[in-house]
Image (spheres, grey):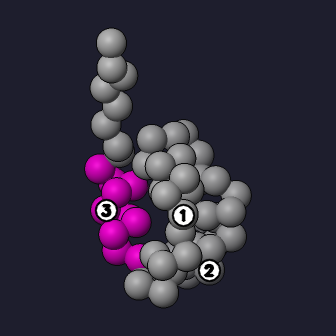
Amino acid sequence: MSESRKPDPEKVAFLRSLPEEIKATITGEEAEQFMFGEYIPESLYEKIKHLLDEAPDSPA
């Protein structure tokens, strides 16, 4: 009995959109945890947080 898991397409697209220099630092384990999990692994978050901070803030 094999477990049939499918990655979140939005998360896959996000990883693919990252600059090459960042993609080169992401481990397979980090990518898998992100694509199949409910959270961003802390080690991956540290690598991409500056990109997330560039998102416009919501009005208060």
Residue indicated by mark 3:
13
| Residue stretch rendered in magenta on the structure | 9-18
Of the 4 image quadrants, the one containing the C terminus is bottom right
- Please tell me in which quadrant of the rendered image residue 8 appears: top left
Between residues 54 and 49, which one lies in front from this camera angle? 49
37 vs 22: above or below: above
For label 3, count other residues whose C-alpha is less than 10 Å away and answer few (under 14), some (14-19) or many (20+): few
Question: Going 54% across and 53% down the picture, which residue do you hit?
Answer: 29
> Could you tell me residue 44's position as x and y percent?
61, 64
42 vs 54: above or below: above
Q: Mark 1 falls on what kind of element?
A: loop
> Could you tell me residue 59's position as x and y percent?
58, 69
Question: Going 64% across and 64% down the picture, which residue do you hit?
Answer: 45
- Please tell me in which quadrant of the rendered image residue 14 appears: bottom left
50 vs 2: above or below: below
Drawn side of residue 48 relative to residue 19, left or right: right
The label on residue 27 is: 1
- Please tell me in which quadrant of the rendered image residue 13 appears: bottom left
For label 2, count other residues whose C-alpha is less than 10 Å away and answer few (under 14), some (14-19) or many (20+): few
| Mark 2 vs 3, N-terminal side | 3
> Mark 3 and mark 2 in contact (Cβ < 8 Å)?
no
| Mark 1 vs 3, N-terminal side | 3
Between residues 59 and 27, which one lies in front from this camera angle? 27
Q: Mark 2 falls on what kind of element?
A: helix
Between residues 60 and 6, which one lies in front from this camera angle? 6
Amino acid type, callout 2: His
Mark 2–mark 1 distance (CA, rounded to whole Å): 18 Å
Question: Going 34% across and 74% down the picture, which residue do you hit?
Answer: 17
Residue indicated by mark 2:
50
| Mark 2 vs 1, N-terminal side | 1
